[in-house]
Image (cartoon, grey):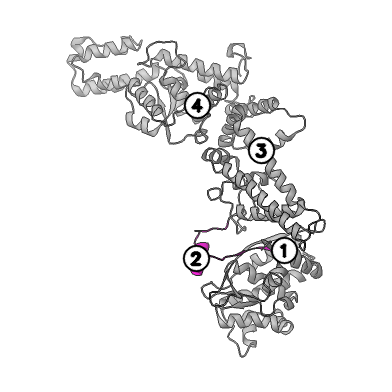
Amino acid sequence: MAELIYSTKEVFTTYLKDRTFKIPEYQRGYKWSDKQIAQLVLDIHDFDATEDENLFYCLQNITLYPSTKNEKVLHIVDGQQRLTTTYLLFCYLGLHEYLSNKFFYAVRASSDRFIQEIQLNNLDFLVAIKTSDTFENFCDQQLNEDFDHQDIFYMYSAIKTFDNLFLTAEYNIQKEQFTEKLKHNVKFIVNEIHSNIKEQELFMNLNTGKVPLDGADLVRAIIITRVAKEEMVNYRNDVIKDIVRLNEKRTRIGWELDQLNQWWSEEKVKHYFSPFVKIETDPQETIQFDEEINPINILYKLWVETKVKPKEKLRLKLFENGNISSLELYRELIFLNRTLKDWFEDREIYHYLGILANNSRGFAFQKYYERWLEPEETRQNFLIELKKDIKLFIFGQEDKDKSGSIYWREHIKNYEGENKTNWYDLKELEKFLILIDVIEISQNPSIPFLSPLHFKKNNEDKEHIYPCTPKNIKELGKSDNDFDAINNFLKQSNLNDTALFPFSEKQWKTKSDFEKEDFLKELESKIHQLTPINSLGNLVLLHYSINRGFGNDYYIDKRASVVNNVQNGEYVRQHTLSVFVKGRSSTINLNNWTFADICENADSIEEKIRVFFDLKKIEDEEPTA
């Protein structure tokens, strides 16, 4: 068939022809609530197609399977709730002439009689429903029928809800206009299955999530069917040449959408852009836009975010908005995709937006896309504005207490003295470590892009480079000459202070093992107070497999493990790798990480941040309050 989408009138007439719809026995009974009924009627009422007769409101899909016993009977495998509601609405509006011998309900004989009665004896039966006070009252009036069943109750309630909506002055629904819109501008995507798959198996697949109906499928169907026609201004469905050209255009559009989906299916693309999406699907929406099933849904969601107000929910009807034609929708999606691909391939934009989208609570894709589209906007200015947003995210407001670039940069360099900053316990540690990665990679074209999953912690722990509990100290008491071992350790650590170890060799040997163990714990605590163990210059994000495997081992052991992970193709952060190969250190000893290395690394971090944000040196800044 040349068509995929049919109006409600066409579904019951030109599409069906001499065939009939049948709801098979295995289907559950009709059960649409008053709320669902009202939502549908009001959505159709609000839908405006006056300026373009080709616009339509999509009732989503119905899946049909020809009966094996009679090919002129189409079993409704999926979508029976929507089609039954449409049938009931046609009956209520007096359109029963389109329905004669077209719809049968095999779930229950009494339910089918209700369905047939409302169509055949239209006026009298409707009056009986509308004038009854309750469902029980209605059932009592039907002396020769057993209508007291749940599915019939919901059909009855649907008619009552229709009547209430059309009679409520607040809604101002003009029945004649509504009827014409329903007949011609409300459409189904019709999927008629001709395959070897068994009907019941198809039903189970559709209703257990194995073959879920997804928003991307519906948007694709809308675009393919409508855009091609909109491109052909003078299309005639009775001209063979036009039909051929129409199908050629649909094939081209389908191929273009497949190319888009192929790019969005790449793991890096999917993981990078997924955090950009903040919009949530409306809880009343029956169709989900599942990014795992169809990654192109990320593109569709981001397009919606450029159109809606803050906190507005995602609904399928946003793609059928009368304010934009399907051709415009398609062109905007293509342009948006081209823009996102440009951002993804631009080293600086990729990293700047990546850190913001993954970490900044106030990230709004619409803001950046609109900024990008401003007529006077340049790529360089766009980057400058992104840096300003990153600076605000990292440092906070400049004029607030415990906030601002000077405040935090002073903390980076505050690695000496009694009141030095303990970065290990600061919640801000993670974003500063990620910022260092972003700065280094965005400015160095020889380094691979940061993995999309690593704009936040990803199976990583915060870890001391020089161990928080040095292996040396733990083993000092086990040395053959523990007195010499302690003194040598303090000398190597530039902590040759008699206050730390105020014992002669004779005094130390008189102490019990328990007393020595207590002293070593106290010594460890004092070393932490006197050294920059918890400085930002001594901290990295390290994968669990390295961190938990080596814990507080020597620097050289951790270094070997980091290098081994890199050689095996596992991801190690750029900043983490730099410190373990001493890429920034002026010392030539690659097997030790000293307190001097910690201080030098902290100074290097502060300088990189200062240069990146084009800030003055701290000594040149105005003093903080």
**Residue type at mark 3?**
Arg
Residue at image location 73% in from the left, 35% down from the top: 373
Q: CA distance from mark 2 to mark 4?
A: 54 Å
Q: CA distance from mark 3 to mark 2?
A: 39 Å
Residue at image location 24% in from the left, 11% down from the top: 503
**How busy is the neighbourhood of tag 3: few (under 14 within 10 Å), some, or many (20 plus)?**
few
**Residue beneath disc 3:** 338
Which percent across, then down, holds residue 236?
Answer: 79, 60
- Total tally of numbered discs in the picture: 4
**Residue beneath disc 1:** 186
Which percent across, then down, holds residue 574?
Answer: 48, 25
**Residue beneath disc 4:** 433
Name above or below for residue 224 compared with residue 147: above
Name above or below for residue 539 compared with residue 170: above
Q: Secondary structure at mark 3?
A: helix
Does any portion of residue 200 appear in the rendered image?
Answer: yes
**294 with respect to 88 (left or right):** left
**523 with respect to 457 (left or right):** left
Quarter of the image that includes the N terminus:
bottom right
Q: Of label 1 and label 4, which has the lower sequence position?
A: 1
Q: Nearer the viewer, mark 2 or mark 4?
A: 2
Q: Of label 3 and label 2, which has the lower sequence position?
A: 2
**Residue type at mark 1?**
Val
Q: Nearer the viewer, mark 1 or mark 4?
A: 1
Quarter of the image that includes the C terminus:
top right
**Residue beneath disc 2:** 197
Which percent across, then down, holds residue 417?
Answer: 45, 14
Q: CA distance from mark 1 to mark 3?
A: 32 Å
Q: Of label 1 and label 3, which has the lower sequence position?
A: 1
**183 with respect to 405 (left or right):** right
